[in-house]
Structures are given as structure tokens and as C-alpha cells.
Amino acid sequence: MVNDLRRVGIYGGTFDPIHHGHLILAREAQEALGLEKIFFVPAAVSPFKGARSASAETRLRMLRTAIEDERSFAADDCELRRAPPSYAIDTVETIRNREGPAAFYYLIGDDHLAELNRWHRFAELRELIQFVVLDRTGTAIDHSYPMVRRRIDISATDIRKRVASGRSIRYLVPTDVEEIIREANIYREQGQ
């Protein structure tokens, strides 16, 4: 029966900023898993990360700009519209209720594996979705989740540091995202 259901991906994160690594891994997951749609869900406030550098509105704008020509990618602001912190279980329930019958795949970066079992209502969450690990580092980590591997040495932390130190981020983020970063004058002082 699961094979007859359409397949939907949910890709949560801070996307501060969205970069080519996120987009390449999303495409790889889409192709590997046969996903009809991937919802990119920017977190208002992650329970595992501190304050972000760009506002929620700016992060959402960068995300929408980065995926605007991709029919199978969509930005979903459900976490930005609810009070923080952003829990994956609430996001999954919101999207499942809206999208109806489907097999749901929750895409996570390999850097989230260590804390995964601490996620809010984790036991319920893993009954509702299939976790898929996006491995961009090639680090051997023991887990039982399906994995999408693609070596990509791009990180939002590095991008923020590059902007703060006046270095170029060309080719690391989509051109329109780079323009938003410049015009909004974000990441100039943080370097984190």
C-alpha cells in the first residue's frame, strides 16, 4: 500500500542562509526516493540551536527566491507562523493534515543524528515519517536510516563567516540569495 502512495519530502532547517548544498542534497533525495514534492520548512527557533543571524522573514525570502523555478520544491512557513520553539512533530502533523494520504520522508542533515532521539515526541514522530539522512561530509556514522550521500563542503556557518570577513560567497549560494544578503546587510558582524 505504501508503494501506491505519493511520496512527499519535508526538509526542515534554519536555512540561514539557504545554499547550494541544501539544494543539491534535496535534488539527490528527490531522485533517489522518487519524491513528488519537497517542502522546505524554515524553523522559527530550533530547540537545538541558538539565535539566528537573519530574521525569519529574510530567511523565508531567501528560501523562496532560491527555489522559485523548481516546481517540485515549495517553501512552507508553518513553523514561522506558530510560537517557538519549532518542533518537527508539529510540522509533520500540519503538513500531513494538509496534504492527505502520502508517504512522508523527513530529510535531516547528518549533523542532527546525535540529537535525533532527543527530538520532541520522537517515538510518535518516527511512526509518522521515514527519516532520511543527508550525508554531505562522508563521515561514517552508525544508524539504520536510509541515506543520501553527496560530498558537499558548503555550510551556512562558513557562508556567514565569509560575509562577516568581507570574502565572496559567489557560487556558494544562488545569485539572488547573495543579492538579498547584500541588500539586507546581514551576517556582517556575526561571523558565526
Image: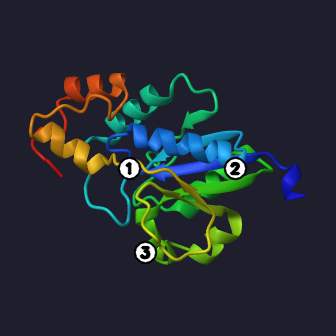
Q: Which of the 4 image quarters holds residue 130?
A: bottom right
Between 177 and 79, the residue placed more toward the observer is 177
Position of residue 32 relative to residue 144, above or below, is above
Image quadrant holding the N terminus, namely: bottom right
**Category of crowding for the residue at label 3, using alpha-carbon neighbours closer than 10 angstroms: few (below 14), some (14–19), many (at least 20):** few
**Do callouts 1 and 3 mark residues in contact (Cβ within 8 Å)?**
no
Cα separation, mark 2 vs mark 3, equals 23 Å
Mark 2 and mark 3 lie on one chain; the one further toward the N terminus is: 2
Cα separation, mark 1 vs mark 3, equals 18 Å
**Category of crowding for the residue at label 1, using alpha-carbon neighbours closer than 10 angstroms: few (below 14), some (14–19), many (at least 20):** many
Is residue 39 something that shows in the picture? no
Kind of residue at disc 2: Leu
**Do callouts 2 and 1 mark residues in contact (Cβ within 8 Å)?**
no
- Judging by the rendered image, the residue that carries numbered circle 1 is 14
**Rendered location of residue 89, percent (x, y):** 57, 63
- Judging by the rendered image, the residue that carries numbered circle 2 is 33
Between 67 and 59, the residue placed more toward the observer is 67
Kind of residue at disc 3: Ala
**Rendered location of residue 98, percent (x, y):** 70, 45
